[in-house]
Image (cartoon, rainbow, N blue to C red):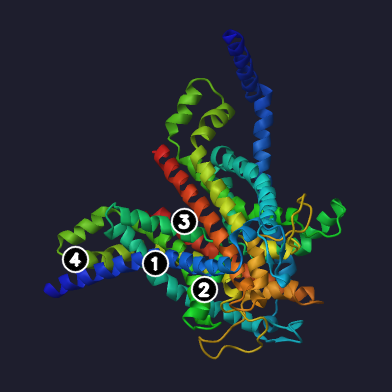
Amino acid sequence: MDMAKNYEKDQEKIKVRSLLKGRGEKIIEFFIKSVGILSIFPVLFILSYIIFKGIPAISWEFLTSMPKNGMREGGIYPSIIGTILLTIGTIMVAVPFGVFTGVYLVEYASDNKFRKIINLTIVNLSGIPSVVYGLFGMSLFVMSLGFGTSIVAGAFTLGIMCLPVIITATREALMSIPSDLRQASLALGATKWETTWKIVLPAAFPGILTGIILSISRAAGETAPIIFTVAAFYLPFLPQSIWDQVMALPYHLYVISTQVPNMPSNIMDGTLFVLVFITVGFNLFGAYIRYRFKKKI
Amino acid sequence: MNVRKIKDNIMKGTIVGIASFNIVIVFLIFMFILRNSLKFFNMVPASDFFFGKVWISLSHIFGLLPLLSGTLWVSVVALFISVPLSILTAVYIAEYASLKTREIFKILIETMSALPSVVLGYIGLYILSGPIKNIFRLNTGLTAFTGGILLAVMAMPTMISIADDSLRALDKSYKQASLALGANKLETVVKVLLPSAFPGIFAGIMLGFGRIVGETMTVLMVTGNSPGLRSTFLAPVRTMTATIAAEMGEVVQGSDHYYALFAIGLVLFIISFMTNTLGDYFIQKSRRAGK
């Protein structure tokens, strides 16, 4: 009985082997290669659609004039300004907290439980759905703290969402700095903080910058966290203070493509192009700096 | 000297304080969502929420199952497409592609991950939904299937890059031993490399799944916005995330409807907590295996 079973098993194995050898090998390898290449076609298609449809819709006037006639005419100036302001606010919230947390994890923490807990919270922060950030931002910043629907509330919400990106980038950058540098500085009598601030952080700067640029890309493209915290449906003038609502590109694209009937397609395509230009542009710029930085080390 | 020592101590305290702040944030997020959800469960029995088969907010009927099934249908489609494609693509770029092709792929995958979800929603709305309507002869092209395809595109960068990393993190001796024993390249990939890289690949799938479940704008725009229990993925649905985004704007603060949306948020928070903790566990495991 056992022998019969073993025999069957061996036959199975031989079958699998012959599938992976000779002609089977060629066919399967061809399959892997073609699927691998095909899988990037969606991005190529989406990018070329956005470029070919979007560029003709872009003009100086489109970029610098207010929307008119229920957004069906005019430009996207307030949305661009809104997105820029929001992104600056986000960076101002996320960078100090993110960089110092990264510094703690690499320079100060011993390999203890506290560090493990912080690592776990970072992993979980990065996985929380964006709409849940929106809920949280609305109930804490907009309501409990009384910020109202404002740039401040939106920047805090997006800033917390971007923390994991900056923390991870800072951590990786600091870990790649050779420890000789720290030891030399400490041996010369510098304190731990002086070593960190004057020697280690400047050396790790390009890596940290990558994280900052990647969070800009993310903050500029997110919609769900800003719907309830800052974004205005239609607001054809610029904000007067940081306690005002603003229009923002991603929410504007959502609004004009789903909520406004008879929307001319060139305005949608133009908005699409500007949004993708900012998000993908910053992302590639960040990737480029990381690449240069890795080469140097 | 003393001043410098004091400054050093102050900065140390500041840094530890800021680092602990992260724990406070996650705790705060959880507390805010939990507190508001508990208010909902005071108004509506939890069993009515978790086992309710109907969601009609205007009639104050808040059943989670239609939204959960919407999320499930979209996830099933997205995973069915993205998992095999991602593994094959990762094998291709890690083992078969030339160095230059690999670089180009890395850039394109990076670009793919940078596309905002509202952009994919737009593409789905204006390009993908038409053909789907015609091919399957449906009344509408806005279905769970449409959303699933787009979310597959969204999840693939995560899955590919983590699978690729874990394939390349494997010690070279694995491959060399297998080749030296007479296995060809494909046998080495299928029988040695893929099984050893499994923890990493699985971690990528978990994190990609987390992204699929949490994605909001794409599904809000392309899955038809119609909460209901469906028996096929070729029907309009509404996911948990889309429900929050669609209804939060029109809700009366402090009403049962308002708190119901937080209860959905709680479910999402718990799902993402589980997938991320599990995913992180497998990433750590694969790093250890790589060494």
Identify the residue position indicated by label 3 in the image.
Answer: A291
Alpha carbon separation for disc pair 4 and 3: 32 Å
Q: Quadrant of residue A207?
A: bottom left
Residue A188: percent from the left, percent from the top? 15, 62
Q: Nearer the viewer, mark 4 or mark 1?
A: 1
Q: Which residue is drawn at 15% across and 59% down?
A: A187
| Label annotation for residue B24 | 1
- Helix, strand, or loop for circle 3? helix
Q: Report if residue B162 is visible in the image.
A: yes
The foreground one among A162 and B20 is: B20
Disc 1 marks a residue whose amino acid type is Val
Alpha carbon separation for disc pair 1 and 3: 34 Å
Identify the residue position indicated by label 4 in the image.
Answer: A191
Disc 3 marks a residue whose amino acid type is Tyr
Alpha carbon separation for disc pair 4 and 1: 29 Å
Identify the residue position indicated by label 2 in the image.
Answer: A137
Q: Do labels 4 and 2 share a chain?
A: yes
